Amino acid sequence: MFRVILYTQWKWSRLPVALLTVGAFLVPLLAVQGTGEARGTTAQAGQLLAYVGAMGTFFPLMAGLSGLLVGVSAWAADHRAGHVYALSLPVPRWQLALFRLGAGLVLLLGPVLAVWLGSQIAVTAVEIPLGLQGYPHLITLRFMLCTLVAYTCFFAISAGTSRTAAIILGGLLALIAAQILLDAVGLDLHLLGTLLEKLFFWPGPLEIYTGRWMLIDV
Amino acid sequence: MSEIRLGVGLVLVSLFAAGSGHAQSTAEVRARFVALADSAEVLRQAVAAAQAREEAKGPRPDSLRHDGLLVVVSGTVPPAVRAAVPLAWNTLVRRYGGGPARPLPDVTVEVVVEAGTPVTLTFRPAQPPTRSGRAGPNLGQLASAPADTLAEAIALIAGRGYWEAGDSLFNGWRGVLDPVWHLREAALGRLYVELVTTTSTVTRRCFEGDNASCRAVLGVDAAPHPLLASYSIEERPDLVARHGILAASRVPAEWVSGCMSHRDPELCDRVLSQAFPNGFRYLPLGEQSRHALLALTLELGGAKAFPRLRASTGQPIGARLADAAGVPIDSLVSAWRSGIVAARPKSVAVTAAGGWAAMGWVTLLGLLGLGSSRWR
């Protein structure tokens, strides 16, 4: 049954997954591609670090995008067809959802492995100055965790009803409106700031996205 | 506080009066309500007046003394500070060589307790150093720190007074910050980054293990001018260009332009020697690197290191440090470099806590996805 689900999910999302895999492979290469004169010249280590740090922002973007596209596409076809296919299957709902979740995880292996391969090639291609070193494994691990967080988040939202999605979206809009209102009346309450703090600081779900993404570092 | 008592009394009387006895007419109820409101207003004013007086008094300073160390604390003394004062004095004695025969001079440190959440402690010397005219470094929010950390902070601030009394050559070499602070792991990690990312060829050679280059970039050699030893001929015009305005204000402008435009080595050397008499400030490595060397010197030399350092005026910096540390200057510099290399900062790609938190969220969100009710 899992293989069938995996196959159908692959059919639905093969184009985005293929594009994501190519993109994920290119991100580490881009992170070192423009280091220019810094390559091999030990005196320019600072320049290399600055460039790698700036280009490192593409890692979390790619991770978020991978999770979003695979997470949403896991249920998109069901939503469009009114869940007829899913209801015709001889399995309970939770089991189908588990298979869908697992199939998405398998599909995400493509971008994750692509990042690992791209990172390996990138750190091999660049002559790293003395005192610095490449971190292809660690950055791949972090990319994988970010992808998983984004994927499970969007998977959970997509798996729910339109009402659930509307509640989440409406809640966010209400929060923004409340913050504008509070600011207007001069009340010193930072609802949005508190929310972002909870999301982006440990142990928030997006903490793994924050900080520098350095393929090459000290 | 008598106003507060009076106000409370008025409110209570009004309340009792309002609740007592017979059925009241509307006018009576209104009158009592007005009286009650008036009493509340009196109470509010009394509380506000009392608060204003308390604020006008300011926080009451308290003080803790342990031998020669006096710590003046504004507001309530946190228990951790109380425990830290003897430890701080012991650190001072150990670091600056106090003893029964030659006690350390008395020092005073001020600890400002700022109420709030979290409570903030600001450490500063009771009097700002006269030479630099700067106030002490604010060591930040240490209220929840353990006693030994607070003791270190107090010792650092108190020690500034001892350092400030040094001779001008030594003070010019070491800079203005407290040296011992930079013994800490994080500071050494920052030095590692500085060493690795430098554009200076001499510093790069130092990082690669060349002791002579390390001595040059630390400015400890008895060279004619520290900048000439620590910058290559090719790098000197760029150094002059970076400080061109300052240089042109001290030496003839044609020297500066000749150095910058024609990269004339002789002119560049002349500009550097004469425009930057205290060249230590412009060395390729920042003063924190020299602070780390000083801290290491005190650590290796023990309690007698600081008095030896202070007493050895007239000698080159390197010889003074070697004498204070009790080891040859090359060994000292080598140990300094090894300490920095050993403090290489760990990669911040993924922390264990962050990784586990992410896995927890993945599990939670996955379970939410399984339990959703799209077609139930």
Image (cartoon, rainbow, N blue to C red):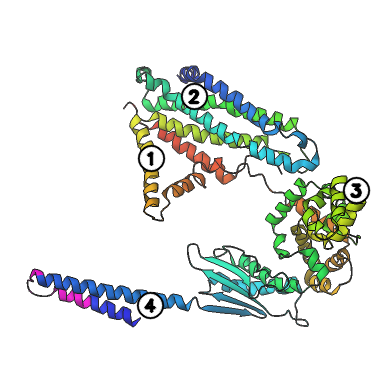
* Camera-side residue of A89 and B88: B88
Can you tell which quarter of the image residue B225 is in? bottom right
Q: Is residue B101 left or right of residue B312?
A: left
Chain designation of label 2:
A
On the image, numbered disc 3 is attached to which residue? B264
Q: Are marks 1 and 3 in contact (CB under 8 Å)?
A: no
Measuring 90% from the left and 48% from the top, which residue is drawn there? Answer: B264
Same subunit, labels 1 and 3: the answer reads no
What label sits on residue B228 in the rendered view? none
Q: Amino acid at mark 4?
A: Ala
On the image, numbered disc 4 is attached to which residue? B50
Q: How would you rate the neighbour count of disc 3 (Cα within 10 Å): few for under 14, some for 14-19, many for 20 or more?
A: some
* Camera-side residue of B122 and B295: B122
- Please, is residue B59 above or below residue A115 in the view? below
Q: Are marks 3 and 2 in contact (CB under 8 Å)?
A: no
On the image, numbered disc 2 is attached to which residue? A103
Measuring 37% from the left and 26% from the top, which residue is drawn there? Answer: A93
Chain designation of label 3:
B
Q: Amino acid at mark 2?
A: Ala
Q: Quadrant of the C terminus of chain A?
A: top right
| Tag nearer the camera, 3 or 2 | 3
Q: Amino acid at mark 3?
A: Asp
What label sits on residue A173 in the rendered view? 1
Q: CA distance from mark 1 to mark 3?
A: 65 Å
Q: How would you rate the neighbour count of disc 1 (Cα within 10 Å): few for under 14, some for 14-19, many for 20 or more?
A: few
Q: CA distance from mark 2 to mark 4?
A: 69 Å
Element at label 2: helix
Q: Is residue A73 left or right of residue B239?
A: left
Q: Position of residue A150 (x, y in %)?
A: 50, 34
Chain designation of label 4:
B
Q: Amino acid at mark 1?
A: Leu
Element at label 3: loop
